[in-house]
Each structure stands twice: as C-alpha cells, then as structure tokens.
Image (cartoon, helix red, strand yellow):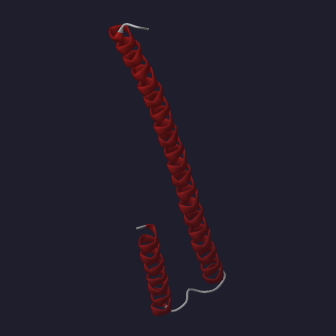
Amino acid sequence: MSNPLVQAFFVGRAVAEVINERLEVALTDALSELGKFDAEAREQLRQFTDEVLERANRAAEAANAGQTSSSAGSSGSQPSDLQAEIDELRAEIALLRTELQHYRRTSA
C-alpha cells in the first residue's frame, strides 16, 4: 500500500465497520435490557393483581361468614330488640369502613 489515498480509504472503511459493529452490540444490549425490564414489570403487576384479588376474596369470605353467623342466630329466634339490631349493623358498618380505609392506604 504505497498510495496514501488507498490506505486512507481502507482505514476509513475499517473504522466504519468497527463503529457499526459496536453500535449493533450496544443497541442489542439496550433492547435486551428493555425486554427484561418489561417482563419484570409485567410479572410484578401480575403478582400485585393476584395479591389484591386474594385479599378481596378473603375479606368477602370473612364478611359472608360474619353475615351468615349473625343471620343464622337471629332467624332461629324471635325478633330481637330493634335498637340492638341497629347497633349491630352500625358496628359492622364501622368495621367495614375501617377495613376499607386500611385497604385504600395499603393500595395507594
């Protein structure tokens, strides 16, 4: 390679090839990391959704169990004092409000 122009051409071409290969590797790595992040975020969202639904189902079952036991007790006997029944309902409402506030705080 005695001609400096030919040598400059090949050097420039080699520089372009190396830059192209390194950009390709960098882009591939970046897209791979983005794919990992997306997959992890989706998995965390799925786990969060499962946990929320599980807690909601447990709370509904607990509420149904409490409702069933209180209705079974009052259905077998004579109608009890109306004020006592109202007090029980108010207590249940207060409990549900507390649980709802707790759920809102933990989900926020």
Q: Residue furthest left?
A: 5
Q: Position of residue 85 (x, y in %)?
A: 50, 87
Q: Position of residue 90 (x, y in %)?
A: 44, 85
Q: Is residue 25 above or below residue 84?
A: above
How many badges with numbers are in the image?
0
Q: Residue furthest front?
A: 2
Q: What residue sits 58% from the left and 75% below the top?
A: 67
Task: Judge left or right: residue 11 versus residue 88.
Answer: left
Q: Is residue 81 above or below residue 92?
A: below
Q: What residue sits 50% from the left and 42% below the top?
A: 33
Q: Position of residue 51 (x, y in %)?
A: 57, 61
Q: Tell which of 98 and 102 is nearer to you.
A: 102
Q: Position of residue 95 (x, y in %)?
A: 48, 82
Q: Quadrant of the image for the N terminus?
A: top left
Q: Tell which of 69 and 17 is nearer to you.
A: 17
Quarter-wise, where is residue 73 in the image? Answer: bottom right
Q: Tell which of 52 and 87 is nearer to you.
A: 52
Quarter-wise, where is residue 108 in the image? Answer: bottom left
Q: Is residue 94 above or below residue 67?
A: below
Q: Is residue 90 above or below residue 44?
A: below
